[in-house]
Amino acid sequence: MKNQGLILKTVNLNDNDRIFTVLTRDSGKITVMAKGIRSQKHKCFSAMQQFCYSDFVLERRTGMYFPVEARVIENFYNLRNSVEKLALAAYITDIVSAIPEEFPVEDEYFSFILNTLFLTAKADAEKQGIPELLRLKAIFELKTVCENGYMPEVTKCECCGSAKNIEYFDITNGRVICKDCKDKPVNADVIKITPEVHKSLYSICESDMRAALSVRPTEQTVRLLSEAGEEYLKNQMDIYLTSLDYFKNLIVKDV
């Protein structure tokens, strides 16, 4: 079987072998076992590293895939020049790994994953700093939730229909609420947002995936948007990962 795939996770079996979770364009998430792959002399070694996007020729035996050939298309090498970028990439691929199988990864979302990793690798830590990584994180979280059927109502207050004075984001019910309706939601988690955060929520959620990656809020808005994104992902899809904790601990140290 020929396929293109992004390596999401790797697990060492012993001193020589490794199991991979690979997101493929044509077959969704698959498990690949490679014997002897931990040796740099293995012909597929360079193409089967964490975060590599590669061309594969795979053989299926006993319910598992084994690599026959593998060639690197993109290895996102510059992820590795920053521990913060590497941590965000790990969080992104962990999110994709955690998406339930009943939500197949469409081609547009597959490209969105690759584009997010590309922009993460490209980010200049010296000039752009942490806000750029938080921007990409928030956009990825929000578009992932939208892609999986939980797009929030962000155009107007869901309670009264007003598009003015939006001050709250109801992460339980997926909607924005104006200041006059703040007490109406029952048994809901509601977070305070600014007009700029509301504008960014609208721009990201209502845009296609390529356009969403071009949304560039201010630094202050980015930090609030990042909190909203992770809370919405956690609440709607029940996804909260230890890789997020690791990334956030790095961010705190760099602030």
Image (cartoon, helix red, strand yellow):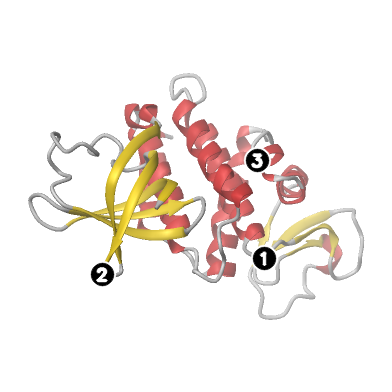
Q: Residue at x 67, y 44 (%)?
A: 209
Q: Nearer the viewer, mark 1 or mark 2?
A: 2
Report the amino acid beneath label 2.
Thr
Report the amino acid beneath label 3.
Thr
Instruction: Give the numbered dot on residue 62.
Output: 2
Q: Secondary structure at mark 1?
A: loop
- Outermost residue toward the top in this view: 127
Considering depth in this image, is 196 or 207 the residue closer to the camera? 207
Considering depth in this image, is 142 or 248 the residue closer to the camera? 142
Report the amino acid beneath label 1.
Tyr
Which of pointers 1 and 2 lies earlier in the amino acid sequence? 2
Residue designated by label 3: 221
Considering depth in this image, is 236 or 253 the residue closer to the camera? 236
Residue designated by label 1: 150
Q: Quadrant of residue 190?
A: bottom right
Q: Position of residue 145 (x, y in %)?
A: 61, 60
Q: Secondary structure at mark 3?
A: helix
Q: How far separated are the C-alphas under marks 3 and 2? A: 51 Å
